[in-house]
Each structure stands twice: as structure tokens, then as C-alpha cells.
Image (cartoon, grey):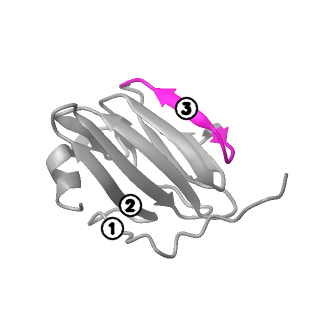
Amino acid sequence: MPNFAFDDSNIAWRRLEGVDHLWLCVRDIDDDAGILHVLFKFAANEKILLHRHKTLNKTFVIQGEHRVYHANHEIKEIRPVGSYKVSPPSDDPHREGGGDQDVVVFFTIYGKGVLYEILDDEQAVVGVLTVEDFRALL
């Protein structure tokens, strides 16, 4: 099979204030079902801030290599292009980032309240991301 390159030049990437190495594009929010569809782009060879998922997330890697790190920065998992992952809510904090190129991941996020908790390096909650935060980026 031939290899194809993903062209994201027509995607209106947005930033979350205070979050380095991450761009996103909210594609849809279904309030009744509590489902969000969001494209995330993580910078190559970088990590985003420490956080934890408070709701079910399903991911599909469209481009690159999606890397997940433990809180101590050690690699936890490497998801190659084409990987599909179902991740239940977890109190286990982690960081995410790209491999040797920017990674693009399609997230389906299930929830109506707090979706993510943002943590400092001591794992204290310093902020949250809710459906309304994502709606502001739609």
C-alpha cells in the first residue's frame, strides 16, 4: 500500500492559553449526548503539561507517533500512526507529546462536566478544562 501524508493546512488550529506544544481544533460538540470531537496536534519531541483525564477518551492517531509519559517524564506508551485507544477516566496523571514529527490525534471525549484536570509538578490540581472551555474554541 502506498504511504500518504496528512495535510492539515486547512485546519483552523487554536491554542489553549498557557499550554505550550499543543494546538487543537474542536470539530463538534453534542451537548445532549455529552460527546466532543477534537483534533489535537502535539509538537514533535515535546511534552504538554501534566494532566489527567476525568472522562472516557477514545483516540485515533492520524499522523506521527503519539507519546504518553508518566508524571516523572518516563515514557509510558508509544502509539504509532493508525493506533486506536480507549482510555477510561483515570486518576493517573500523565503528559503527552509527539515523536520525531508533530503528531495529530483525533479525540472523542465523553462527558458533560470537568473533562481534564491540569496539575502542577507536585500533582496538585491547578485548573480544569470543561465542555465550556472547548465550546469557546469551536
- Which percent across, then down, holds residue 111? 24, 32
Distance CA(mark 2)–CA(mark 1) = 6 Å
Classify residue 90 by image quadrant.
top left
| Marker disc for residue 24 | 2
Between discs 2 and 3, the one toward the N terminus:
2
Q: Residue at x 26, y 66 (%)?
A: 17
Q: Which residue is mark 1?
A: 15
For the record, the magenta segment spans 78-89
Please report contact status of discs 2 and 1: CB closer than 8 Å, yes or no: yes
Question: Which residue carries the number 3 mark?
Answer: 85
Real-space CA distance between mark 1 and mark 3, rounded to the nearest whole angstrom: 24 Å
Three-letter code for the amino acid on which mark 3 is drawn? Lys
Quadrant of image for the C terminus: bottom left
Identify the mark nearer the N-term, 1 or 3.
Answer: 1
Residue visible at 38% across and 46% down? 121
Give the residue drawn at x 49%, y 27%: 86
Q: Secondary structure at mark 3?
A: strand
Q: Amino acid at mark 1?
A: Arg
Q: Residue at x 30, y 43 (%)?
A: 36
* Left or right, residue 137 beside residue 82: left
Q: Which circle, 1 or 3, is nearer the viewer?
A: 3
Which sits in the foreground, 85 or 46?
Answer: 85
Q: Is residue 74 visible?
A: yes
Give the vertical position of 64 relative to 34 (above or below): below
